[in-house]
Amino acid sequence: MGGADKGEFEELLRPHLGVAARLAFGLLQDRVEAEDAVQEAALKAWRRFETFRGGAFRPWFLGIVANQCRTVRRGRWWNVIRLAQPEAPQLSPDPVRGADLRRALLELRRGQREALLMHFYLDLPLDEIATALGLTTAGVKSRINRGLRRLRPLLASEEEVHEPA
Amino acid sequence: MSLRRALDGALDPGPEFPSQALAYRIAAALDEPPERRPPRTRQVAAGLAVLVLAGLVVGTLLISRTAGLHRSNQTAVPGSTPLPLTTQRGAPLAGSAAGYFISQSVSPQVMWVAQFAPSGVTHVSRSLNGGGAWTEVEQIHGLSLPPHAQFFSPDEAVVVGPIAYPQRFGIRVYATSDGVGWTENEAPASVGFLRKAYFFSSREGWLLTVSRQNAGTNEPTTLWHTSDAGAHWERLTDSSTVPRLSDSRSQLAFDSPSRGWLYGLDFLLRSTDGGRSWQSTHIYPSGGSIQSIGRPHGNLMQVTTTSAASYVYRTADGGQTWSPVRRLPHSGSAVFLSDVRWVIQDKDRFDVTDDGGLTFAAASAAVPTGWHVWPPLVAAGEIVTAAISDLPVGQGGRIANVFALGGSAPADSTEPMDMKIQGTPPRFAFVRSLDAGRTWSAVSIPDLP
């Protein structure tokens, strides 16, 4: 990899593996696929590391993770071989409610889902989400708000959803 | 409840997420070559390396390693017990033959087959035109189960087996280095009873032996070495020093005269001194308990977990430590033709990857109705071979251990084996790919005389 330092890359990567895996899990809703996606994203990030111009590593890497998850999701319907997962993870203490929310998330537009999960599930600030997704902060807000409007019927009965400022 | 809490509840990945293995996997993946599709020169070099390795691979298509990779399918079926059928036997297939075989392609044109007939005669045949015509090059009398055969080149082969009734004691090695003349060497009684054999060439090989016939697991086991086709045997070590040697499910293999592997359900030992000493290797976790470990090929090996997930592991230090680098789409038998080119068998289909498991393409072999592909796959360069059989599928799954079929001979029988199922013996044939698993065709083998 030319002059890139793998040790430096791994040092930068390590603290963000947890949030990256969580993002991938939120987008894919599958533990194994999520870890595979993070691994693949790490490999792609390493290959592109020489083009990383400094700045914040986390949003740069999360952008690659989100992109990899898109690839995985796209591949789900055309892949000729997919195994049923041997063990279904217990995703929610309230399976009905959790299942509804998970399904609703999957029905969101991709950009809405990514922005919404990054903000409400990973607690990332808007400017970092904007960097990760290659958007302006206004664009991120717009996607989050549109996503919230679609989720509101599911959540409105019990809760108040606070839209980002 | 806020959306944050709702998401935390709905998207709880469970404990230990991400798994500890993820960091190891990434570190190992970063060691991979930067380009997944190697340049042609590298592919050729890798192919040659695999060709050399494949020459060392046990030629058997029916070895009991299958039981390790597919333990859940392992069904011990005495030959006298009718199988619970869920499917009818396959229609007769031209080019198939009954009995127990070990076969290997050493080039697109040169194939060997050793056929162990119920009469007790082992027929060793060779084809020089890709299976179009076969010539019997040797008849061996008096070998019993479990036989062992390896083929290294158009002229070099070795057949090893326990001596059959009435002697029922001892081990014989038959070897040729020119395809014409065969040597016959009988191991002294002190060597014991054959459990496993592995040869690196027609002259250099290893035996795992036990002190009594039909010994179960944990029986004291000894490892022997020969460098003269079995004329002399040197005792290397035993299970009092290396307890894993006595595991009857252990498999033995050598990449070179010095580097060897002893592998089993959940362990992998490595020797770097020709088998005199063995060291444990470190296998990082992959998200589940390990159920079986396949033989390392180059820097890769297949590991299957108890949850039927299958992973490709990679080593960057010659085999001392192994890390998972890729989860395979299913737990079928995998063979690694190079770092990035793998073939996995799934029922009667083969999945092929050219990019280290990023994408797979499916290839179907022309397996007739009622016939089934038997793992494991065997590779030599870009040649991949698989056995097919008309063995019926039982309710407990496909029979995966052909040795179980050899156990029906009565104690006083002069017949070394009786492999009949519902009155007729199973038949075997082969399918082979010359282009790394993309296209497959049937290969005829000679029927027993």
Image (cartoon, coloured by chain):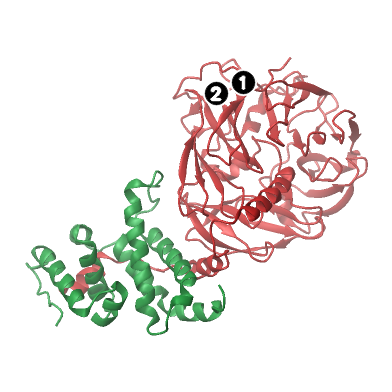
Report the amino acid beneath label 2: Asp
The chain letter corresponding to red is: B
Dot 2 alpha-carbon crowd within 10 angstroms: few under 14, some 14 to 19, many 20 or more: many
Q: In which quarter of the image is the C terminus of chain A?
A: bottom left
Labels 1 and 2 in the same subunit: yes
Where does the image place residue B392, in percent across and percent down from the top left?
Answer: 51, 25
Q: How many marks on residues?
A: 2
Q: Look at the numbered discs 1 and 2 and tell me whether their residues touch, using CB distance below 8 Å.
A: yes
Q: Quadrant of residue B376?
A: top right
x 35%, y 73%: residue:
A62
Where does the image place residue B291, in percent across and percent down from the top left?
Answer: 55, 51
Q: Is residue B127 visible?
A: yes
- The vertical placement of B129 against B449, above or below, is below
Looking at the image, the residue that sits furthest to the left is: A157
Report the amino acid beneath label 1: Ser
x 59%, y 41%: residue:
B67
- The vertical placement of B166 against B283, above or below, is above
Residue B143 relative to residue B328: left or right = right
Secondary structure under the numbered disc 1 in the rendered image:
loop
x 91%, y 32%: residue:
B183
Q: Name the residue under label 2.
A: B390
Residue B275 relative to residue A33: left or right = right
Q: Quadrant of residue A40?
A: bottom left
The nearer-to-camera label among 1 and 2 is: 1
Instruction: Pinpoint the chain carrying mark 2.
Output: B
The label on residue B96 is 1
Q: How far apart are marks 1 and 2 (CA)?
A: 9 Å
- The vertical placement of B186 against B225, above or below, is above
Residue B98 relative to residue B352: left or right = right
Residue nearer the viewer, B112 or B117 = B112
Secondary structure under the numbered disc 2 in the rendered image:
loop
